[in-house]
Image (cartoon, grey):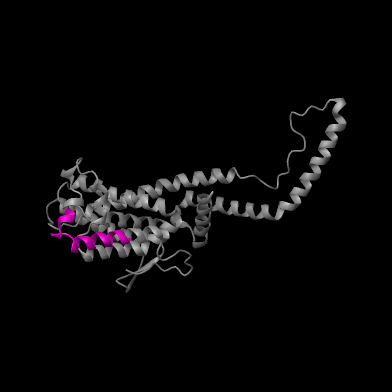
Amino acid sequence: MSYPTDDDQDYPRLTPAVQALIAINIAVLFVQMTALVKYTDMAGWFGFEASGLPAHWWTTVTYMFVHGGVLHLAGNMYALFVFGPRLEHMWHHKRFLWFYVLCGLGGVVFHVLFLRHGVLVGASAAVFGVMTAYAMQWPNDEVYLFALVPMRVRTLVVALLVFNLAMGLLATAGASGANIAYLAHVGGVIAAYVYVRMSASGAMDNVRQRVANLPDADEPPRAIPRALPRSRDRVDEVDDIVAKSKAIAGKRQAALTPRTRRHEAKADELNRVLDKISEHGIESLTLDERRVLEDMSRKLRDL
């Protein structure tokens, strides 16, 4: 599997949260292989096992940083390196980290619900969640499976989901003795799907509300307050106020018109993109429309 094709990439290849996660996982495996008497001790201490709850509650998180070997670690970290940075760039590192942990917890839930035996280790559930979120945001990006076979990200994730679901069902039926937590992977996918769908719905309402509350610079200030009395003895004073207010409004409107037109154009474009998501889903957006959404997301995050 190689990088998604994106000729206009505007995000770093390695973002802070992804870099930290990869470093922690590598460090843990190094300790497993060098500092411990037995290679499996780390899995026993920090791997998740349903029978250990609630006493060993911390293992619901720590299991994500323990791996069964170099190949297990390499596969997970490479997938995180390929799909994580763009997602983190769009969401910011704090939200990305919470999402990562959430998907890992989704893996725990499915493991407990359908298996309840064996020790669960590895970042696979969290990484599958990252891949799912990427596929939901940029479904038509292409990756090269085994560096040879071109495949859309959405197709890759759906194929992996079907494979893991089938293998997980076989494992629960006792037809497979493999210790790979297939259903934990499915749990990470489901957690990611629910999160992205729910946050997309809430984000659209939030963006619409914030755009609607932005001041319209083209609208001049009201010359006369609605409740301002216009008795005979104040006619001259009121007329003077009206004249000054109109003069200020005219200067302000002339000064702000070019900027306001750009603001209105951006707001109209954003509304069009949000309407399209509501009607056809986020996967229907073009690359330019996704950039509009990402730009607004970054601006709102910086407010």
Residue 275 seen: no
Quarter of the image where the N terminus is located: bottom left
Q: Which residues are magenta?
A: 22-43
Return the x and y of residue 270 as percentages of the image width and height: 55, 52
State the predominant SS element of the stretch in magenta.
Answer: helix
Q: Nearer the viewer, residue 43 or 51?
A: 43
Left or right of residue 216: residue 211: left
- Furthest residue in direction bottom, as rendered: 148
Return the x and y of residue 3 as percentages of the image width and height: 37, 68
Q: How many marks?
A: 0
Q: Quadrant of residue 179?
A: bottom left
Residue 133 seen: yes
Q: Is residue 40 magenta?
A: yes
- Furthest residue in direction front, as rendered: 35
Return the x and y of residue 72 as percentages of the image width and height: 23, 63
Return the x and y of residue 78 as percentages of the image width and height: 31, 65
Task: Please determine whether, in this image, residue 168 is positioned above or below residue 10.
Answer: above
Q: Quadrant of residue 43?
A: bottom left
Q: Nearer the viewer, residue 140 or 114?
A: 114
Q: Residue at x 37, y 55 (%)?
A: 133
Task: Please determine whether, in this image, residue 108 is positioned above or below residue 241.
Answer: below
Q: Residue at x 87, y 32 (%)?
A: 236
Q: Quadrant of residue 124?
A: bottom left
Q: Is residue 159 magenta?
A: no
Q: Nearer the viewer, residue 276 or 190?
A: 190
